[in-house]
Amino acid sequence: MKEYPTKSIRNIALASHGGSGKTMLTEAMLYFTGALTRMGEVKEGTTVSDYQEEEKRRGISISTSVIPIEYKQHKINFLDTPGYTDFVGEVISAMGVADGVIIPVESVAGVEVGTELAWSYADMFELPRFVLINVLDRDNANFQKALDSVREMTDTRLIPLQFPWGEKADLKGVIDLLTMKAYQGAENQPVDIPDDLADIVEAARMEMIEVAAESDDELLMKYLDDEELSPEEITQGLKKGLQARAFVPVFASAGTAHIGLAPLLDAIIKLMPSPADSPPVVAEGAQGEEELTASDAGPLAAYVWKTTADPFVGKITSFRLYSGSISSDTRAWNHIAQEEERFGSIAIMRGNEQINVENVHAGDIVAVPKLSVTSTGHTLGEKEHPLTLPIPKYPNALYRVAVSPVSQADSAKLSPSLTRLCEEDMTLSWIQDSTTRQTVLQGMGGQHIDVAIRKAKSLFQTELDIAIPKVPFQETVTKAGSAQYRHKKQSGGAGQFAEVFMRVEPLKDERFEFANEVFGGAISRNFMPAIEKGVKRVMEDGVLAGYPVVNIRAAVYDGKEHPVDSKPVAFEIAAREVFKLAVKNAAPVMLEPIMEVKVTVPESNMGDILGDFNTRRARVQGMDTKGGRSVVTAHAPLAEMQRYTTDLRSMTGGRGIFEMEFLKYQQIPSHLAQEIIETAQEEE
């Protein structure tokens, strides 16, 4: 693959609902531009983009693939993202390094939940975008209906720059307003626009010229003076308006039939910004914020947006070069890990194929194998010019599983395997939950976690069992309570003696406070650390059901000691027992984590969601309507939300999405707390 300067590069994310034809569109473009001699099929697992074993097995994309297309002395790096909502982290990572987005809309189904999600993330990254009404050769395809569904989703002005020429089985090609030509068949042969479409095309062209003129003051004056705008001026105005996100152009295609590919690629080159045209990225430098433009002359700054574990090559690190240029066999400084990395070779990725290149210019997206300390989110650059590039915000985990090793051999590999999985995917995380003593893997949904577990086995040879995790309940007291306990042990030789009087009471805003209120030397001061240690041990292990005790003040106010038999260990044992008794006398209760949940669903599903929330002990906080969809905010116990991703998908046919984050701990109703306590006692 030849070298491409910054001005000749386009970084375009393909993001939308699953089944809108993203992967087959990239496959068709590879074939159309001569990079492939035979097209693959998603169902057969033979596409360039879906190369992972899991993708072939499931028949869906689960990670973002880079598909570079060489066309008319330009290189377009297509980032083919998954459409399934479990893998939304891949969409965020791709948009974080893209300069523009194409949102394919399936011509039969129209806008779906993945389309809306892609649109909202494109808004978040402030990216210019195309809408592509795709698979127009399908039965029941309807360009206008699909376009109307997009208009219902957004307030942004939509301007068709292409129309289908025919539809369904009679699709002949597309009409392109930029060139005022009809592109016929799979060959994309430009021909004159048919006479029967002339009136429709002329009306649409006038709207296009008006939008182009509005984007540029000089063009607007010329337009208002009834002067004709040249094709170059129209393109200039459209490009300016697109970058300002004043409108969204609409295109038409049938990817697998190769219809509409040439005019779409031409439009990407003409209208979408190159890295040099995109706004500068703001990096954090030694002297504060620093703006970086895509220039080879700038300081080296590369953002690592993806790492992949390849069973044959090892770790592959993908990054976008925001500033500076780079060559193979050079060195770069990792500003996060504070270590130097050596680049043996640099590759352009095409699916899992590595095409080695010597030099890379600012704005390009490339990969390097076998870096030692670098992972996703890191910045590579020059040691003497420290810079860190911003990391996109990823959603909170929605689905949790407790993981445990299948064998002793897997046990040793558990921590490294989970760490490597989470390095690859910013929406995966794992914790060692001290409350439940479980290893918990967190992700976006059941499929997401299932893919991670299978990867652990296939890539890292670590077999894991999964289970629904225990909820991290807590225990506390609601009033003051006192108790006394005498520990006495005599078994030949030195004995053990300690007597402790203790009072416990609720404590707001703090987890624990220990007080020595003993006067007159009933218990020596040097035994207090042992008493506090005993209390803390019980607080970790729990009193009612084995969960940590929190928000409590423990005060020792009296006791007795023996001049010979009293020892720290005796006071530690006495403290443990007296603390348990005092807690039981202080009206103890169980606490559960409460989550703030925000659910977005079609209005037709609103009643189902509210009814379901009633069964989950949720308290609805508010309802709103946004873009024709209902948004419900509620506070719900984590215990009731552990598998909500699956339930919501079932209730809404996959059209509902939600986000969830920890809010607070709250007292559990007494009858439910009793069930938890009884279960814990049975397990003991």
Image (spheres, rainbow, N blue to C red):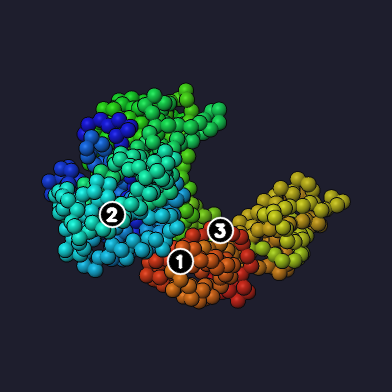
- Toward the left, the furthest residue is 37
Using residue 543 as the reference point, say whether residue 212 is left or right of it: left
Query: Residue at left 87%, top 51%?
Result: 520
Q: Earlier in the sequence, mark 2 or mark 1?
A: 2
> Between 64 and 466, which is closer to the camera in this rendering?
64
Gap between marks 2 and 3 measured at Cα: 55 Å
Residue type, numbered disc 3: Phe
Say whether residue 7 is visible.
yes
Q: Position of residue 54 (x, y in %)?
A: 27, 55
Q: Could you classify mark 1 by the number of other residues whose Cα lies within 10 Å: few (under 14), some (14-19), or many (20 or more)?
A: few
Per the model, the C-alpha gap separating discs 2 and 1 is 32 Å
The CA span between labels 1 and 3 is: 28 Å
Expressed as whole percent of the image width and height from the top left, the position of residue 683 reads 51, 68
- Dot 1 corresponds to which residue? 628
Amino acid type shown at disc 1: Gly
The spot of residue 622 in percent (x, y) is 57, 67
- From the viewer's side, name the closer residue of 441 and 580: 441
Residue 662, which numbered label? 3
- In which image quadrant can residue 350 be found? top left
Q: What residue does disc 2 label?
A: 202
What secondary structure is found at the residue carrying circle 2? Answer: helix
The earlier-in-sequence mark between 2 and 3 is 2
